[in-house]
Image (tube, grey):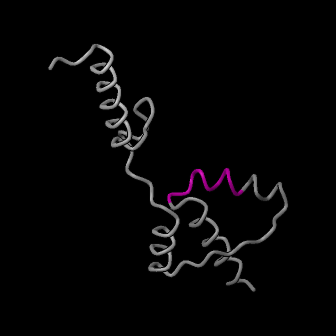
Amino acid sequence: MAMKKFDLEKNKALKLTNSMKLAGGERFGKGAAEAPALDRREQRKLDQAQGLVPFACKLNVEIVEVLKEKAAQHPDGMTGLLTEVIKRGLEGA
């Protein structure tokens, strides 16, 4: 029994939709070259294993801007920069 043209096109569309779902919904090749990002739970476990604890505080906007600029140059980013600055400050206290 031969399939109708409509049924053939419908099957093609279903296959295409299925393959897009299996590809993870990535659009326009985004993420193809990137390593998969960790979800929050995995990141929290890695941080805890390193002895890191989240610590929130409110800072003046000018200080935050300076920190962002310096963190961009720091090899360990914002966390590494803040760790150094706080340690130096505590040594003098």
Q: Which residues are magenta?
A: 67-75
Residue shown at the point (61%, 61%) measured from the top left: 78
| Residue reaching furthest to the left | 1
Q: Is residue 69 magenta?
A: yes
The quarter of the picture where the C terminus appears is bottom right
| Residue reaching furthest to the front | 1
Locate residue 20, reporting x and y percent: 37, 36
The quarter of the picture where the N terminus appears is top left
Residue shown at the point (54%, 77%) measured from the top left: 52
- On screen, residue 65 above or below 12: below
Prevailing SS of the magenta stretch: helix
Residue shown at the point (83%, 54%) measured from the top left: 62
Q: Nearer the viewer, residue 84 or 48?
A: 48
Locate residue 12, reporting x and y percent: 29, 24
Q: Nearer the viewer, residue 30 or 7?
A: 7
- On screen, residue 89 above or below 10: below
Residue shown at the point (37%, 33%) measured from the top left: 17
Locate residue 5, reporting x and y percent: 28, 13
